[in-house]
Amino acid sequence: MANIKSAIKRVRINNESREKNQSMRAEMRSHIKKVDALVEKNDVESAKDALKTAVRKIDKAVQKGLIHENNGSRQKARLTKKVNSLSA
């Protein structure tokens, strides 16, 4: 364990940040899985609504630096492609 006051604070801040990041990443992944499940059920309208929220969560994760910008773009493109294939 750290002895210096600033190091103790850094440990505390890092732990708080890690917990926040983990919950945000888990929430993003849950929304992605929800879209995939709705695509499997062929539920077009619900899938479109879920896609909107999933894209919002992915964008927020990119903005916060949780995932790389290219990774976020790739995930959004794949989800959009799946949802659009239902309509066609």
Image: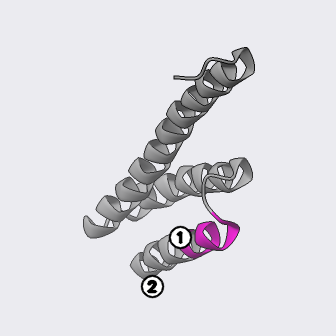
Q: Looking at numbered disc 1 in the image, what kind of residue is underneath it?
A: Gln
Residue in front for this viewpoint, 1 or 28: 1
Please indicate whether residue 26 sits to the left or right of residue 6 in the image. left
Question: Which color mode does the image show?
Answer: one colour
Predominant SS of the magenta segment: helix
> Which portion, as a residue range, is magenta?
68-75
The residue where tag 1 is placed is 75
Q: Is residue 71 magenta?
A: yes
Judge whether 23 appears above or below 48 on screen.
above
Residue 69 located within the stretch drawn in magenta: yes
Gap between marks 2 and 1, in whole Å? 20 Å
The residue that appears at 68% across and 25% down in the rendered structure is: 7
Left-right relation of 24 to 86:
right
> Which quadrant, please, contains the C terminus?
bottom left
Residue 44: assigned label: none
State the residue position of label 2: 88
Instruction: Give, as a three-letter code, the residue at label 2.
Output: Ala
Q: Nearer the viewer, mark 2 or mark 1?
A: 1
